[in-house]
Image (cartoon, helix red, strand yellow):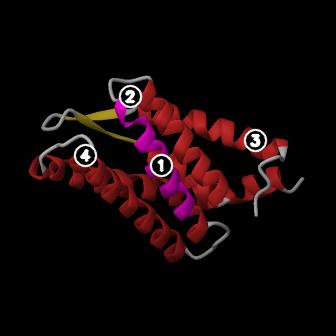
Amino acid sequence: MTKIKDPKIIGIVAVFSALAFVATRFIQIPILQTGGYLNFGEAIIYIAAIFFGPTVGGMVGAIGPALADITSPYAAFAPFTFIIKGLEGFIVGKISSGSKDKLKKVFGIILGGSVMIIGYFVVEISIFLIPPPVALIEVPFNILQFIVGGIISIILTERLKTSVDRIMYR
């Protein structure tokens, strides 16, 4: 289990949260039908979760994207993003962390991504009272977002594994 008091882990959470913030807040593709956007923060959350486990993945998922919401026109989503993306990162880390099996990583990403999709859909229809047909428009974009993030994260974690091992186990 990751010890959050370890200065190295605190630094990792800070750096990956900042990266998730930037990838969420500034690398966006607008969804014209709903006013929402597709982003690349998922890739950063998944990389952190796969390399450093559920605690780091959950914290990065909660902090970076919630800060992106707070600093955007979507501030009302921030508390929900904190929970949804935090849970997403935790799940991916719990299933995928430390695994050399790509299928296990894919399964973790699919499960975490599914939590994100369902979480936002439920929040949109129950809290923000968005009509279900309108909220459903975002679902394919959220699916695309976690698939693209998953592909990027699997490619990068495979290529960077040796470098991260050197940093962590010095």
Where is residue 51? Give x, y as percent. Answer: 66, 58
Q: Quadrant of the N terminus?
A: bottom right
Q: CA distance from mark 2 to mark 1?
A: 14 Å
Question: Which disc is residue 83 wearing?
Answer: 1
Element type at mark 1:
helix
Q: Amino acid at mark 2?
A: Ala
Question: Which disc is residue 10 wearing?
Answer: 3
Q: Which residue is mark 4?
A: 124
Where is residue 12? Give x, y as percent. Answer: 71, 43
Q: Residues within 10 Å of mark 3 (few under 14, many from 20)?
A: few
Where is residue 113? Give x, y as percent. Answer: 40, 60
Between 88 and 83, the residue placed more toward the observer is 83
Element type at mark 4:
helix
Q: Amino acid at mark 4?
A: Glu
Instruction: Examine the rendered structure and indicate whether residue 41 appears above or below residue 113.
Output: above
Tags 4 and 2 touching, CB below 8 Å: no
Between 19 and 94, the residue placed more toward the observer is 94
Residue under the point 47% across and 38% down: 65
Q: Which residue is mark 2?
A: 75
Of labels 2 and 1, earlier in sequence is 2
Tags 1 and 3 touching, CB below 8 Å: no
Please give the count of numbered marks on the rendered protein.
Answer: 4
Among all residues in the image, which is located at the extreme right?
A: 170
Give the mark toward the camera: 1 or 3.
1
Between 25 and 70, the residue placed more toward the observer is 70
